[in-house]
Amino acid sequence: MERESQELTSRVQRLELFEEDTALKSRVAELEARLNSNSRNSSKPPSSDGYKKKPFPRKKKGKQGGQQGHKGRTLQQVAHPDKKVQHTPGPCSCGHVFNDDELRVAETRQVFDLPQPRLEVTEHQLLVGQCPDCGQWHRGIAPEGVNAPVQYGPGVKTLSVLLKCRL
């Protein structure tokens, strides 16, 4: 009888362990599914995706670059550049220093670039004059918006607002 009791206890324990194991496996599966869900495969908002970088989908539709038979385009040199800078060679190994008559252009290279921004200063001169007939003095009037001896113009103000809003 004692042996049957031990066997029955052992079976009950195994059954309890099996039920606990099944419950734990379902809990792990539920947690893994929650971990793997994102805004693309669930109703979660994109902000809940975190800071993980999304994989970039690569689409292979042939070779990169210009294809066979395609007429290429590239930046072309202009006939009349805005500025020319000559680069003369240094002295010869024998010590001879070249003068302008001995040199010719071997190659030209052109660089396209934006000019440096520069403030343009406009001076408004308010002229004064005395009427030769009555002796009354008359003075010129500054344009609207020119209120101080030194100030920024509307272009600088606009640029500062744009830069502040963009940054």
Image (spheres, rainbow, N blue to C red):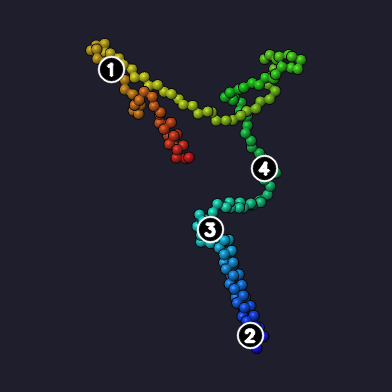
Instruction: Please report whichever mark, 4 or 1, sits nearer to the chain's N-terminal start.
Output: 4
Please report contact status of discs 1 and 3: CB closer than 8 Å, yes or no.
no
Instruction: Please report whichever mark, 2 or 1, sits nearer to the chain's N-terminal start.
Output: 2
Q: Is residue 29 or residue 4 the one in the foreground? A: 4
Please report contact status of discs 3 and 2: CB closer than 8 Å, yes or no.
no
Q: Provide the secondary structure element on which disc 2 rests.
A: helix
Instruction: Please report whichever mark, 3 or 4, sits nearer to the chain's N-terminal start.
Output: 3
Number of residues whose C-alpha sits closer than 10 Å to that of mark 3, classed few (under 14), some (14–19) or many (20 or more) = few
Q: Which residue is mark 3?
A: 39
The disc label shown at residue 5, or none: 2
Distance in Å between CA atoms under marks 3 and 4: 37 Å
* Residue 166 falls left or right of residue 7: left
Number of residues whose C-alpha sits closer than 10 Å to that of mark 1, classed few (under 14), some (14–19) or many (20 or more) = few
Q: Position of residue 137 (x, y in %)?
A: 26, 15
Q: Which residue is mark 1?
A: 138
Q: Position of residue 123 (x, y in %)?
A: 40, 21
Mark toward the viewer: 2 or 1: 2
Instruction: Please report whichever mark, 3 or 2, sits nearer to the chain's N-terminal start.
Output: 2
Q: Position of residue 52 (x, y in %)?
A: 57, 52
Number of residues whose C-alpha sits closer than 10 Å to that of mark 4, classed few (under 14), some (14–19) or many (20 or more) = few
* Residue 153 falls left or right of residue 4: left
Q: Provide the secondary structure element on which disc 3 rests.
A: loop
Number of residues whose C-alpha sits closer than 10 Å to that of mark 2, classed few (under 14), some (14–19) or many (20 or more) = few
Distance in Å between CA atoms under marks 1 and 3: 74 Å
Q: Which residue is mark 4?
A: 66
Instruction: Please report whichever mark, 2 or 4, sits nearer to the chain's N-terminal start.
Output: 2
